[in-house]
Image: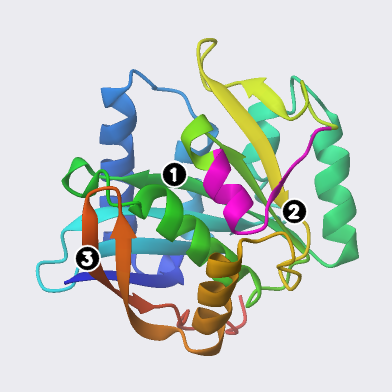
Amino acid sequence: MIHIRTFRAPDDPEACSKFIVGHKRLLELYGITQITSNKQDWVEDPKTMVILVEDKETKFIYGGARIQIKTDQYELPIASAIGKYDPKIYDMINADEERGGTCELCGLWNSREVAGMGIGSHVLARVGSVLAAKLPIVSLFVLCAPVTVRMGKRVGCVIETSLGNNGLFYYPKDDLVATAMRLRNPFDLSNADDSEREKILSLRDNPHQLFEERGPKGMYQLEYNLDIPNLHDPV
């Protein structure tokens, strides 16, 4: 059974270590060695929420992502990635932080064992939107590869066309393109597709569910467990 769970990074160091190894291995397959979301200091940050996709019995990790909240200590990876090309990203992030807080969905990846099932794009983007409503933030940023822009739009994100070249940047290599996107209000899902809106709202109301998912390779069952233990503990 494929299982997806969430936790604060410092609460499960072993899982974070496996996450880092799996993400790094995947990036290296594509010749990517420098990417801002692959830094490892987040493992000690209680404001970083880890989304982990794993086999419920064997604990083999199939993929995951992180939601990193902007703090004085930790800058959002998107700022480090594209700030040197367009410093307006800093103004945008700071404005949202002053309005109530902001974060980034970053480090999305999936292993080859589940390639073609939609986990690395559809599922993780959906979970990011679900969790955004649980956190002390008013917006969520994401830097999307071309194959994930469509899914960003499906969950309600918009392309920030005021940044870069209509939202586009050459990152993390000169021959790759990334798109800056933002969920401007986690509680307003008016830009989301109807089917995704229904699933997001359902998971927000009931974070423990078993869904029948459909990916390019067919149907499969996915168990969601989206409560974040210790979320409101003092740090």
Q: What secondary structure is found at the residue carrying circle 1?
A: loop
Marks 1 and 2: in contact by CB < 8 Å?
no
What residue is shown at x 31% (from left), y 51% (from top)?
A: 19
- Type of amino acid under label 1: Gln
* Residue that protrudes farthest toward the left in the picture: 58
Precedes in sequence: disc 2 or disc 1: 1
x, y percent for residue 9: 44, 63
Precedes in sequence: disc 3 or disc 2: 2
Residue under label 1: 40
Q: Quadrant of the C terminus?
A: bottom right
What residue is shown at x 49% (from left), y 80% (from top)?
A: 203
What residue is shown at x 76% (from left), y 70% (from top)?
A: 188
- Residues drawn in magenta: 149-161
Residue under label 3: 220
User: Marks 2/1: CA distance?
Assistant: 17 Å
Q: Is residue 111 on the magenta stretch?
A: no
x, y percent for residue 133: 66, 75
Mark 2 crowd level (few <14, some 14–19, many ≥20, 10 Å Cα): few
- Type of amino acid under label 3: Tyr
Mark 3 crowd level (few <14, some 14–19, many ≥20, 10 Å Cα): few
